[in-house]
Structures are given as C-alpha cells and as structure tokens.
C-alpha cells in the first residue's frame, strides 16, 4: 500500500505538471525553452573519423575552434600562425612571414625551410591535403570550423600525418535562401581587413557561395642603410593579401550531391625581417638599444605569391552504403621571397660579409584523388574503405646575391616528383550499449624522384639526382567505454609513417636524404559533459616513440639546410580542455598541455653554432655538438589558453566583453641547445569590447591583439652573427560585422 501510494502521488504530480504546462502561454513556454538552451553548451561535432560525430564519441584527442572564438582570433588580420597556442599542444611558426608556416603537435614537427620540405603535421582544407609548405598559409575566412587532431592519423588521412592533422572546412552553399555576411575592420599600422560571403540559391537543385578576403598593412618599419640611422631608404613589413573562393552545390535528389570549389590567393609585401645582433651575447634577451620599429639593411626585401586550386566532392547514397569521390588540384603559379639573411650591413659587429638570398618556386602542381565508401548500418557494425592517389610535381630553388652590386652570385634549381597511393579500411563495432571498438589499417607506397636542374657557381659534391621509394602498413585500434550518460573513457594505440624526404644541394651541402620515419603512439582519455551540460571537459595522456625521425640541421657555419635521422625520439604528455557556462552572461574556456620530448641517439652530432653559447657536449675539435637528450625544436613544454565572455542585455541587443589569453614556455630554435637561441616564454592576450543587436545580426566592436605588447625573439639564423626575428607588435582597431 505504501508503494502504491507513492506511485499514485507521482502520477498525480506528473499529470499536474502537464496540465500546468498546457495552460501556460505559448510565449512563456518558449521563453523557458530558450532559457534552458542558453544554459546548456551546444553539442560540438567533428569529422575526425571522416564521419560527423559528437566530439565526446571520438576516441581521439581533438579540439575544435568555431564560431565567435575563431572570429575573434582572425579579427586583427593575422595569418594562420594566429592558431599557435590556441588549443593544447599546437605550435605554428615561420621564418618566411605570412608564407611557409611550419606546424608542430605535441612537440613533433619539422624546422625544414626547404621548398620541398615535408611535415609530420598535415594541413587539410576541404578534404584536400595541402602538402607543399607554400600551400599551407591560405588565409582564414568564411570557415565553418577548424579541427586539430593530435597524434597519428595514418589510417583515414594518411598523407604525412604521424604528428596529427589540422583540418579546415569552409562554409558550404545551401538551397535555403540568399544569405551571407560582411566584415570590415581597421586598425593600427594601417591594417585593414575586409571579408564577406554571399549564398545564392540558383534553383531548387543548384546553389552558389562566393567568399572573398582583402587584407592590407602599411609599411611601418623604418629602413636605414647606415648605423647612425640617418639615411632612411624606405619602410618595410607591410603586406597586401587577397583571396577568393567560389563554390557550387548541385543536389538533383536525395541520393546524389556534388560540391565544386575554385579558389585563389595572391600575396605581396615584405619578407621576414632578419636583424643582425638582435640577441645579446650570453643571454636570450634583446640586445641593448634594440628598436623593433626600425632596421638597418641594404638588401632588397619583398615577397610575392600566387596560388590557385579547385576541388570536386561527389557523394552517392546507394542505400546500404554511401560512396564518395574527392578530387583535388592545387598549383603555385609563382613564389619569390627575398631578404637579408646576414641581417645588416658591413660595419656592424659580426657582419663580415654581405649576402641576400631568395627562394623561388616557379611551378608546382598537385593532384589528388580519393574514392571512399562507408556503410550506413543501424546495427552495431559499421565500416569504411577507400583508395587514395597523390601526384606532385614541383620546381624551385634558391639564389644568392651580392648586397652591394645586387648581382646574382649563385643559383640552384631543382625538381621533385612525388607519387603515392594508398588503400585503407576502418571498422567500428558496438559490443554493447556501453563499449565500442574501432580499428583501421592502411597500406601506402610513396616514391620521390629528385633532380638538380641548374647549379650556377655551385659545385655539387654529390649526385645531381636521387630516387627514393618506400611502402608501409599503418594501423590503429581504439576503444570507447561509456561510464555513464555523460562520461566516456577511451584508449587508443596508433602508428604513423612519413616517407623519405629530400633536401636540395647548396654551395656547402650536397643533396641529402632522410630515411622514412615511423611512430607508435599510446593514448587514453576522458570526455565528459558536466553539471547538466553546463560544462564540458576533455582530458588525455599520451606516450609516443618515433623511430628514424627526420630532423633538419640548419646553420652552424653557413645558411644551409641538411637532413638527418635520429634513431629514436620520445614524447610524453597530457592535454586538458574545459568549457563552461558560469551564468547566462558569463562563459569561460580553458586549456592546457604538457609536452615532453627527448632525442635519444648518442651517436648524433651536428655542427655547432659559430656565435652562440652552446651548452651541449662538444667534440674535441670544437666543431660538433651532441644533441642526445635534447628536446625537439619549437616544442614548448607547457601551453595554456583561456577565454572569457561577459554580456549584458541592452535595448534589443547586448553589450559584451571578450578576452582570450595564451601562454607558452620557452622553446629551442635549433637541434643543439644554446643560451642565445632559446626563445623566452611568451604571453599574448586579446581583448574585444562591443555591442550586437537585432538578434546578433549586426555587431560593432573595438579590439586589441597582443595587448601587453610583449615582444619576444621567436626565431634565429645561425649564420655569422646573432641574427633573429621577433613576434608581431600590439595591434588595435575597430570592426563592424553584419549578416543578411
């Protein structure tokens, strides 16, 4: 009787609640629903496993940058390097300015500045791998989101992904209505950014989306040709950038879809500014009297780049399976970057001779094709399988010039042809409602043919041409266990592979080859929705070992690039992501990563710095330094990131304050360790204050980037003086955005 009484009370209460809801005004019910939604985090979906899934269900350490956070980061007109430190374990740097970015995940990357360099972090844009480093700097605009996949992704993505993947997806056309956005900003140093997009349904089967970007910064750094800085010869460090993307969507019925994409980029401006004697001897500080708003150089300095590309993504729904065809074509029509690698003029300490250098990519064509089929089972078993083909043909080289006469003193032009194909498959099986296992396998064959086409005033000390070919089987295995409705635990073991790399010859170094490298990685983590979805937390730990890691030796006694292999490199660490709604007005995010890397090869020595204070063991002749036990270059141990957004309803809109902060610990610039060539910890903060109205349709804001104006030496050239370069200064401006 007692049990029946309790049950009766619950039934009556339930009926009472339903009756009360039924008599509430519709507007009140909707208001309550909206309030509940405002107090819940939206589900984040990713395509880390080539399917759209809840990020909590994916057994990979992955971060997504979307929406307002991405909009805020790009507001200052920065290039792709703005993503550095914005998610756990990600670093991006460049010694070429806005072109040729180099990516590092979990400390694992490549400092190679060769035009034919390969990287262990793959950049994928709209399902197309951007293999050559020159292709990796395409500006960020009209992007639906960015995903950073940490750890080997050698099964489903495959093309040079032993460290991970950075994945971009553009906003796509739709058949619904005419809509779009426009964004205008203007800031310090005459920095202007204009981008926008419009979606136009052309019929009930066709839609078009046109996206465009224009960026400009004035030349604001004074250039002098004398040590007294009285003979001003010009200004530097400006740029002009424009890019376009046109997409067409064709959906004649529910079983077929075709998406066509054509895009281009044109960039001109200053190359990276190298500064002689930037670093104070015996420290990693700026030298006394350093003025980062001026430079002393007599070299020509410029950078020009033009790229074009197109892709076609087709899908057929065949009932039990879905078939995909992904075709991509990328080309570099022209790339020329010229600068002053000695960083100064005759008369400055440590500048015994003058030299300018230029990198030129005169032609690059990349073609890729993938066919993939995936199951659509409602049962516990699902799978996908496919074939992949890659074909690249690149011609480019380097020139040296006399800074006084501007005459060319040497030239090397090379060509690389790279062909590869792969077959892959992946299976997932739900053992029960709580436990799912996944496994994948991929077979890859990769062949490179490299030839020196021209060498003027350069004596080749080795063969002019070389051919390398390797095949490899990679695999991964993971399991996801639902501890409860809100918490998943996962574990993953995965392998990865990067084919042999080839570096061009120079006046001092022959053509060099680094053998194929492999990685085995172990990872485990927890992904959880907390406090009735008011918070979300992800935590992972990992341990990896790279065998035969490809490393780049730069500098020493000349500005050369040489490839070597380390027998073993190890990495361990942890990553943490947190997002939460403190109140309807306050939202916070935070992330952290710890990455420990170590080269393990007692027999590996490299040319030591001719100017820096090297702290590694040195050979008896004083020429070579042991790098055994050293961390990898550009690999900070700690990265922290945090954002906060506070809003106050005002009239028909809201006033808001948004701030974001990132911090990384010190980094090494080179394989050896030297006091001068260690970058100090870096803290960068952003602030945005604005007002949006009409349901977020319009927004006006004032913003600042690197608001502390913390300047750091972020890279160096180990050549004939303590030459280095620095991060971007503080910028601030105003922005207006609108949607229609």
Image (cartoon, rainbow, N blue to C red):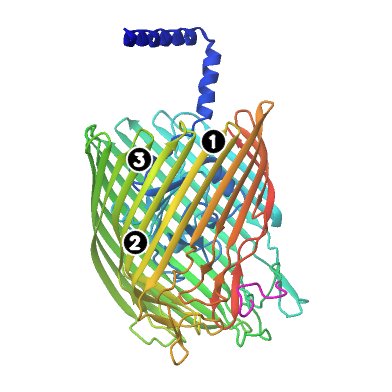
Give, as a single range, the part of the protein colored magenta: 280-290
Q: Quadrant of the C terminus?
A: top right
Against 154, is 570 above or below? Answer: below
Is residue 94 left or right of 451 when viewed as pictured?
right
Which numbered marker is on residue 581? 1
Which numbered marker is on residue 564? none
Q: Which residue is mark 2?
A: 544
Q: Position of residue 31 (x, y in %)?
A: 55, 19
Distance of mark 1 from mark 2, alpha carbons? 35 Å
Q: Position of residue 240 (x, y in %)?
A: 61, 57
Against 721, is 333 above or below? Answer: above
Q: Position of residue 325 (x, y in %)?
A: 30, 45
The image quarter in which residue 676 lies: bottom right
Helix, strand, or loop for circle 3? strand
> Residue placed at 38% from the left, 40% from the top?
56
Q: Quadrant of the N terminus?
A: top left
Distance of mark 3 from mark 1, alpha carbons? 21 Å
> Pointer 3: residues within 10 angstroms few (<14), some, or many (20+)?
many
> Residue placed at 62% from the left, 60% from the top?
239
Is tag 2's residue or tag 3's residue first in the polypeptide sequence?
A: 3
Is tag 3's residue or tag 1's residue first in the polypeptide sequence?
A: 3
Is residue 185 left or right of 601 when viewed as pictured?
right
The image quarter in which residue 106 lies: bottom left
Q: Which residue is mark 3?
A: 488
Q: Position of residue 103 (x, y in %)?
A: 45, 61
């Amino acid at each position: 009787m007692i049990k029946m009484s309790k049950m009766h009370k619950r039934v009556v209460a339930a009926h009472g609640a339903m009756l009360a809801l039924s008599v509430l005004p519709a507007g009140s019910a909707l208001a309550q629903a909206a309030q509940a939604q405002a107090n819940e985090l939206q589900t984040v979906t990713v395509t880390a496993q080539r399917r759209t899934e809840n990020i909590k269900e994916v057994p990979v350490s992955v971060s997504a940058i979307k929406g307002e956070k991405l909009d805020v980061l790009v507001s200052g007109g920065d290039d792709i390097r703005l993503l550095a430190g914005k998610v756990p374990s990600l670093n991006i740097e460049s010694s070429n300015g806005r072109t040729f970015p180099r990516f590092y995940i979990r400390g694992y990357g490549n400092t190679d500045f060769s035009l034919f360099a390969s990287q262990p972090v793959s950049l994928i844009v709209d399902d197309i791998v951007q293999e050559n480093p020159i292709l990796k700097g395409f500006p960020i605009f009209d992007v639906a989101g960015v995903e950073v996949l940490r750890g080997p992704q050698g099964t489903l993505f495959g093309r040079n992904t032993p460290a991970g993947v950075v994945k971009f997806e553009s906003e796509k056309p739709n058949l619904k209505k005419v809509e779009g956005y426009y964004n205008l900003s203007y800031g310090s140093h005459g920095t202007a950014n204009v981008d926008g997009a419009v979606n136009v349904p052309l019929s009930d089967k066709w839609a078009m989306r046109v996206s465009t970007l224009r960026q400009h910064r004035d030349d604001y750094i004074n250039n002098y040709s004398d040590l007294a800085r009285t003979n001003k010869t010009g200004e530097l460090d400006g740029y002009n950038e424009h890019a376009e993307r046109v997409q067409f969507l064709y959906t004649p019925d529910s079983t077929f879809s075709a998406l066509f994409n054509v895009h281009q980029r044109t960039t001109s401006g200053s190359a990276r500014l190298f500064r002689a004697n930037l670093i104070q001897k015996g420290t990693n500080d700026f030298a006394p009297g350093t003025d980062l708003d001026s430079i002393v150089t007599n070299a020509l300095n410029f950078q020009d780049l033009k790229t074009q590309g197109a892709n076609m993504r087709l899908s057929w729904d065949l009932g039990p399976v879905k078939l995909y065809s992904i075709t991509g074509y990328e080309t570099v029509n022209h790339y020329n970057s010229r600068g002053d690698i000695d960083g100064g003029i005759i008369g400055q300490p440590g500048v015994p001779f003058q030299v300018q250098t230029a990198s030129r990519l005169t032609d690059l064509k990349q073609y890729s094709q993938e066919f993939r089929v995936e199951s659509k089972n409602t049962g516990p078993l699902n799978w996908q399988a496919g074939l992949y083909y890659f074909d690249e043909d690149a011609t480019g080289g380097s020139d040296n010039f006399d800074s006084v006469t501007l005459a060319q003193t040497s030239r090397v032009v090379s060509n690389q042809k790279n062909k590869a194909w792969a077959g892959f498959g992946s299976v997932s099986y739900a053992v029960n409602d709580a436990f799912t296992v996944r496994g994948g396998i991929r077979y890859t064959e990769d062949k490179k043919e490299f030839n020196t086409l021209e060498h003027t005033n350069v004596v080749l000390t080795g063969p002019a041409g070389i051919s390398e070919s390797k095949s490899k089987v990679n695999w991964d295995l993971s399991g996801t266990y639902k501890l409860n409705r809100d918490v998943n635990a996962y574990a993953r073991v995965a392998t990865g592979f990067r084919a042999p790399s080839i570096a061009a010859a120079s006046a001092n170094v022959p053509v060099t080859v680094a053998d194929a490298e492999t990685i085995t990685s172990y990872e485990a983590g927890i992904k959880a929705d907390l406090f009735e979805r008011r918070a979300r937390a992800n935590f992972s730990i990992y341990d990896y070992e790279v065998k035969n890691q490809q490393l780049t030796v730069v500098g020493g006694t000349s500005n050369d690039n040489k490839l070597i292999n380390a027998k073993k490199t190890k990495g361990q660490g942890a990553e943490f992501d947190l997002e939460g709604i403190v109140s309807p007005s306050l939202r916070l995010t935070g992330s952290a990563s710890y990455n420990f890397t170590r080269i393990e090869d007692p027999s590996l020595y490299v040319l030591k710095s001719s100017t820096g204070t090297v702290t590694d063991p040195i050979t008896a002749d004083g020429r070579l330094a042991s790098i055994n036990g050293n961390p990898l270059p550009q690999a900070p141990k700690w990265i922290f990131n945090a954002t906060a957004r506070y809003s106050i309803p005002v009239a028909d809109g809201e006033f808001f304050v948004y701030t974001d902060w990132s911090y990384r610990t010190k980094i090494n610039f080179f394989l050896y360790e030297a006091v001068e060539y260690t970058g100090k910890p870096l803290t960068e903060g952003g602030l945005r204050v604005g007002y949006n109205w009409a349901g977020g349709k319009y927004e006006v804001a004032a913003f600042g980037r690197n608001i502390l104006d913390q300047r750091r030496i972020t890279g160096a050239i180990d050549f004939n003086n303590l030459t280095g370069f620095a991060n971007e200064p503080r910028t601030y401006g105003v922005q207006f955005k609108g949607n229609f």
